[in-house]
Image: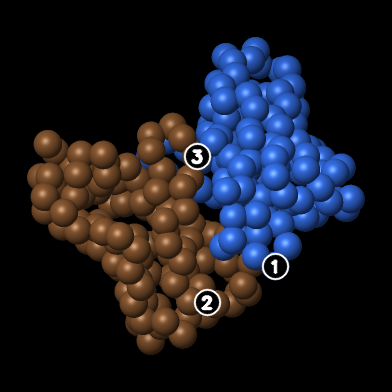
Amino acid sequence: GAVVSQHPSWVICKSGTSVKIECRSLDFQATTMFWYRQFPKQSLMLMATSNEGSKATYEQGVEKDKFLINHASLTLSTLTVTSAHPEDSSFYICSARGGATGGSGYGYTFGSGTRLTVV
Amino acid sequence: SQQGEEDPQALSIQEGENATMNCSYKTSINNLQWYRQNSGRGLVHLILIRSNEREKHSGRLRVTLDTSKKSSSLLITASRAADTASYFCATPLGGSTLGRLYFGRGTQLTVWP
């Protein structure tokens, strides 16, 4: 089945530094990638949608200069949290969509998530 | 949540019992999907039901959809301890087939052995 590889699975960084999270579609072309954020015991909140080769579309209230998204190829999208602060600590999950049926046959394939802790 | 509500927020049952989780959504939909998330992990797709379907089965899972009430339910029969996880419903935005996917609040299911 379709697989989206997300790295790193966890990261601890110092306040003020930047962190990059990668999502790769391993066996299909992801024309669209979605990035979510999840706080403990809460739901997934959509942050942004990125289409290969174009600028990402951010949800209302999400700072585009803080959460930089790059989708330069059909198999790779990255989320960079710039100048991270403790309040950015969260679980970040990507989801890839590829073509009419998607990589997994139903449209969306999720990465395994990245736990970011900013100290 | 960005799309709807789920209830209960938490459900605790014994192995062998059935677990029912409900989801309500706000806008018209093309399809509704249920996902499972183990603690600290990514999401696993369980089942998709289209707006013209009323019920769907997959193994021990049974999903119903009532578009007039804008609600769906997920039934897990004969639950097992391994079913312990969070369960989310999600719908693509605005009646699209594969648009931005919005999630409900989720139900935390605990199955005691």
Q: CA distance from mark 2 to mark 3?
A: 24 Å
Q: Which chain has been coloured blue in this picture? A: A
- Rendering coords of residue A107 (x, y %): 61, 61
Please, is residue A66 above or below residue B37 in the view?
above
Q: Which residue is mark 1?
A: A100
Q: Residue at x 16, y 54 (%)?
A: B78
Label 1 near label 3: C-beta < 8 Å?
no
- Rendering coords of residue B20 (x, y %): 22, 61
Say which element carries label 2: loop
Please, is residue A118 above or below residue A66 in the view?
above
Task: Check disc 1 and give the amino acid type.
Answer: Ala
Task: Check disc 3 and give the amino acid type.
Answer: Gly
Q: Which chain has been coloured brown in this picture? A: B
Report the side of B83 relative to B92 (left or right).
left
Identify the mark nearer the N-term, 2 or 3. 2
Q: CA distance from mark 1 to mark 2?
A: 17 Å
Query: Quick one: label 1, few (<14), some, or many (20+) residues within 10 Å?
Result: few
Q: Residue at x 46, y 35 (%)?
A: B41
